[in-house]
Amino acid sequence: MNFSQTDLSFENERLFYFALLLAVAPLWLAEYPPGIDMPGHVATVTAVSEIWRNNPLFTELFELNWFTPYLTGTLILYLLTLAMPVGIAVKLILSLIIIAIPILSGRLLEALNGDPRWKWLIIPSTYSFAFYWGFFPFLAAVPLGLILILLTIRFSREPTIVMGFGIAAYTMGLFFSHLLVLGFSSILALAWLAGKNYRNIRRLVVLRSPYTAPLPLIGLWLAGTQSSGTYVGTNLFSFGPLSLRLQELVVQPSGLDGKFYAVSLIVTTVIVGMPFLTGAKLTKKPERWMMSICGFGIFMVFPAYAVGTAFLYQRFGLYLPLLWFLLWDKPTVVSNRWHWLGMATVVLWATTNTMRFAAFDIETRDFDKIIAVMEPGKRAAGMVAAINSEQFSYPVFMHFPSWYQAQKGGVVDFNFGSFYGTLARYKDSKQPPYGSGLGWNPGAFRWEANDGDTYDYFVIRAGIDVSAGIFKEHRPNVELVVREGWWWLYKKTDEDR
């Protein structure tokens, strides 16, 4: 067998696709993806399914809301659940997302006359802040946003009326995938058009016009959000400290969550340093500078919280490596000398993820035993006092009880159906007084104020028995069904209240 230098370089496509398989492998080692909001989004799919099956438990409580910018990912997940279990379906979609983002990023760099080989170093960023927070609709929309930018490049080079209407229709469709992805991708696309056509203002105005198509939809959505009153926080806007953004510039490109900071530092250092090591030169293309500056600018100045939605700018950390590589031209003298370092870094990252996902799977096995003894079709309240995992720095157990809704067709609060934008949301008359704040502080639960009589089960995660602190004078109203590790399952008793 002959061995050439390209065998261990970024140009080896077979190794690239093998690296993608290494990237998705951790997902399949853990029964539950470690995304904070993921159980809530998956539970929404179950609600949609049960509504269409005319299940009275769900039809009495929920209504379908088709005007939502979180539609596409939820519907795709629902369609897959018709053929496979919901846990398999969500991991399949996440795998396709993780595979698609580096591939499409490489295509984009190639279309912009950049270096498509940097797609190797975009792989780690797919496990970003948005992944660990479980922002499933956002993640599902990211590949579609990259496609919008690719379509924009084609449209600029071959502007036709048909293509213009196609762009307009695509942006309107992207609205129903995720508003933030639509906005971020459109800004990058418009920045590219501006950098490419700034000498011809009339042409620039014409080329930009299709991107105004979703503005009426956005206006209607924002108006509805403001009138709904369902917010994650209390302030209208919040930006957060600058120091946190600077820290995330280091952590997010690595696709790790800060728990393994040394590995994060290595991965990000290699991402930043690889263009210098390989002799790449900063581009002189103004359109690519415009895209990169706008993207980094949004990450640095966009609010952390606005109009009822939390963790806004943090989601864009997924794009940071791509924005960095947009600034560099492909080296004129092709050298593979340092490619081994980038490939070894990806392997190090994948190995780290594999080990902690496998450990997380062990950590969650006790929860399976809790679900196993819960009767299907009941109402449950999640009270996760211990929200953190040993493997991740994010509170990945916060909404974990919602897996009961996803797997056994019950209803769990806190429920994402309380949010205005959810596909299956609570009817106004059925909105439970069980707010998202209890996810952070279950000790604030009050039996009367939070309708304790409504629930058949109470799912608690804690290292010690905290039932007295949660139920207080109503502790006799519940009895312990089973304890498994950190999980405690209580059931409402029939005693007088």
Image (cartoon, grey):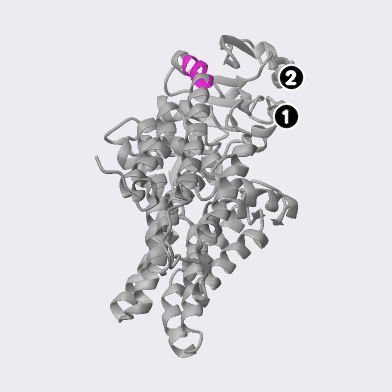
- Image check: 45 left or right of 282? left
Relative horizontal placement of residue 143, taking residue 300 as reference (left or right): left
Query: Who is closer to the viewer here, 122 or 274?
Result: 274
Question: Of marks 2 and 1, which one's residue comes earlier in the chain?
Answer: 1
The stretch in magenta equals 363-370
Q: Residues within 10 Å of mark 1 (few under 14, many from 20)?
A: some
Mark carried by residue 460: none
| Residue 456 spot, x, y in % from top left | 53, 20
Relative height, residue 147 to residue 243 (above, below): below
Question: How far across and how far down the image is residue 303, in percent?
Answer: 66, 58
Residue 221 in sight here? no
* Quadrant of the snapshot with the N terminus: top left
Q: Quadrant of residue 392?
A: top right
- Which residue of the protein is positioned furthest toward the left in this rendering? 1
Q: At 48% from the left edge and 23% from the top edge, which residue is drawn?
A: 361
Residue in the picture at 30% in, 32% down: 84
The residue where tag 2 is placed is 469
User: Viewer-proximal residue, 372 or 245?
Assistant: 245
- The amino acid type, in three-letter code, at marker 1 is Ala
C-alpha distance separating marks 2 and 1: 9 Å
Residue 449: quarter of image: top right
Which quarter of the image is occupied by the C terminus? top right
Q: Nearer the viewer, residue 422 or 179?
A: 179
Q: Which residue is mark 1?
A: 444
**Dot 2 amino acid type:** Gly
Residue 270 visible? The answer is yes
The residue positioned 46% from the left and 80% from the top of the image is 196
Task: Verify whether residue 59 appears in magenta.
Answer: no
| Element carrying mark 2 | helix
- The picture places residue 365, in percent across and down from the top left corner, at 49, 18
